[in-house]
Amino acid sequence: MTPMSTLDELPAVSSTRRVLRISKTVARVFGYCRANAWPLFVAAWFPCFLTTLCLTVLALVLFADPGQAPTWLLSRGFDPRTWLSAIIAAPFSAMVFAFVLDRMANAPEHGRVVVRRGVESVKRFAIPGIRFELGRRILLAALLLAAVQLLCGFAVAGEHRLLVAGLLATRDLPLNPEDVAPWASAMGVFNLLAGAFVLVWTYLFVGDFFWTGSFDPIGCWRALDGNRLRFVTIMLIVFAIVATLKYGLVLAAALILIPADAAPPSFFNLMLMHFGLAWPFDVLHLVLSAATVGTILGAFRPPAIASIRSAAAQ
């Protein structure tokens, strides 16, 4: 593995003004991920696989027979369309961030499974090629991720209800597609940009929690003084690259592999394709996001090496 210390070498930051260089930071992130591709994959693949597996099972249980799903579990702002998906995915996303940032801080991490029970009892055993951890830091970070995802998801669902109510109040029934399409498109673009903006800062604060060993969003915000817009731009570039790869490759594969006259897939096969094809891009998204956050935090927020090492050794 190629070691990385964002404190000793800062090619992405101006030496006089400590200003992030957008292109150099993005290049730094991709260079680090390329040089450490296998260790990062080992750190991320199993939590992302568990996310895919759990969400697929959840979708099959709730939506194989839509009429049987309790309405209080359903919401349009999530994928699959239930607020349980945000709660299920959060711990696994937190694990990936923790493992990637541990490596970037040069903490001694080895492939293992750690499950904490109670306060003192810790069960630990090694499985080559697998990383999994449940502990205080993972659960606290997962709580923040889940809370933000729930807030955003319910906001999207409420926005949809307001749009429908507004159209019904101002348009004659039945509604024409021409009346709905512009509003739906504008709402989709707004939700995409607003959701990405919220996710950027959520990732930063979660990453800062793992990096410094304490939850200090105000200190993290102040540390990026003069670089906040650049940070958001860098993260959005990373998001856009992953999204372009994801939808471009999936669309190309669908056009090549699925005949035009093929029968519609069953719900089971559709869910497998939906979440299965998303898995490698989920790995890429979380690894690149964590590496970007780690690169920037390494320039402005010295890691709490002692706390990271003690957490790794527990």
Image (spheres, helix red, strand yellow):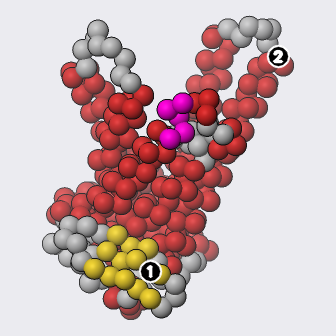
Give me the disc on residue 170. Answer: 2
Residue, disc 1: 116
x%, y% of residue 197?
55, 51
Determine whether 76 is above or below 164 in the image: below
SS at mark 2 in the image:
helix
Determine the main secondary structure of the stretch shown in magenta.
helix
x%, y% of residue 205?
53, 68
Highlighted magenta segment, given as a residue range = 61-65
Q: Quadrant of residue 290?
A: bottom left
Can residue 125 be seen here? The reply is yes
Depth check: give the residue in front, 104 or 64. 64
Determine whether 109 is above or below 49 in the image: below
Q: Is residue 239 left or right of residue 119?
A: left
Q: Quadrant of residue 35?
A: bottom left
x%, y% of residue 244?
34, 37
Can residue 301 be seen here? The reply is no
Residue at 41 percent of width and 53 percent of height: 51
